[in-house]
Amino acid sequence: MKARVKWVEGMSFLGESGSGHTFLMDGAPEAGGRNLGVRPMEAMLIGAGGCTAFDVVLILKRSRADVTDCVVELSSERADTDPKVFTKIHFHFIVTGRNLKPELVSRAINLSAEKYCSASIMLAKTAELTHDFEILEVAA
C-alpha cells in the first residue's frame, strides 16, 4: 500500500491514496491552519471507524443477516503531552436491519475488533478500545 501527502499552502496538506482518492487535511487556526479539512488525527479515527464498519457489515451480510445500515460513532481521548496518542477510543455501533440477533451483531463486532480490523488493532497498542452497540429495527 502506498500513499502520498503534499503540502498545499499554510498548514493544508492533500492526501492521495494509492488507489487515486484524495482528501484535504488542515490544521486548526491556532496552529496556522485555516480549518479547511480534517485534522490528521481525525482522519486516523475516521479510518478506524470505516475499517471496523466495513468488517461488521461484511460479516453480517455473509451471515445472511438482513442489515440495512451501520453507523459507528467514535469518541476518543488523547494524551495531554506529546506525542498526543490516542489513550481511549470508544466505538458505538448503531446497526439497523430486520430481525437482527444481538448475539450475531456482537459476534461481528468482536471478530472485527479481535481479528480483522487492522486499524483498530493497531490503535489498541496505545489506546484502550471499548465497544457497544444498539440495534434498530426497520419498519415493515
Image (spheres, rainbow, N blue to C red):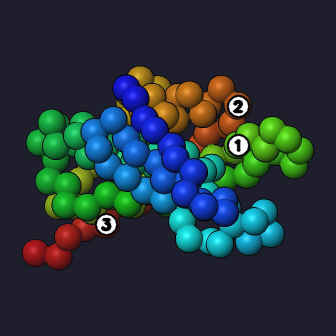
Camera-nearest label, 3 or 1 = 1
Residue type for callout 3? Leu
35 sits left or right of 6 in the view: right
Reading the image, the residue beneath label 2 is 126
Q: Residue 67, image x and y in percent?
A: 20, 55
Residue positioned most to the front: 9
Q: Are marks 3 and 1 in contact (CB under 8 Å)?
A: no
The disc at residue 136 is 3
For disc 1, the marked residue is 86
- The image position of residue 55, as x and y in percent, is 32, 38
**Splitting the image into 4 quarters, where does residue 29 fall?**
bottom right
Q: Residues within 10 Å of mark 3 (few under 14, many from 20)?
A: some
Using the image as rendered, state which of residue 54 and residue 132 is in the foreground.
54
Q: Residue at x 59, y 43 (%)?
A: 130
How far is the residue under mark 3 from the one under mark 1? Answer: 30 Å
In terms of depth relative to the viewer, which is nearer, 4 or 103?
4
Whether residue 76 is visible? yes
Callout 2 crowding tier (Cα within 10 Å): few <14, some 14–19, many ≥20: few
Rendered residue at 56%/71% (across/down): 36
Mark 2 vs mark 3, CA separation in Å:
32 Å
| Residue 12 vertical position relative to residue 78 in the rendered view, above or below | below
Mark 2 element type: loop
The kind of secondary structure element at disc 1 is strand
Which numbered mark, 2 or 3, is in the foreground of this view?
2
Label 2 amino acid?
Thr
The earlier-in-sequence mark between 3 and 1 is 1
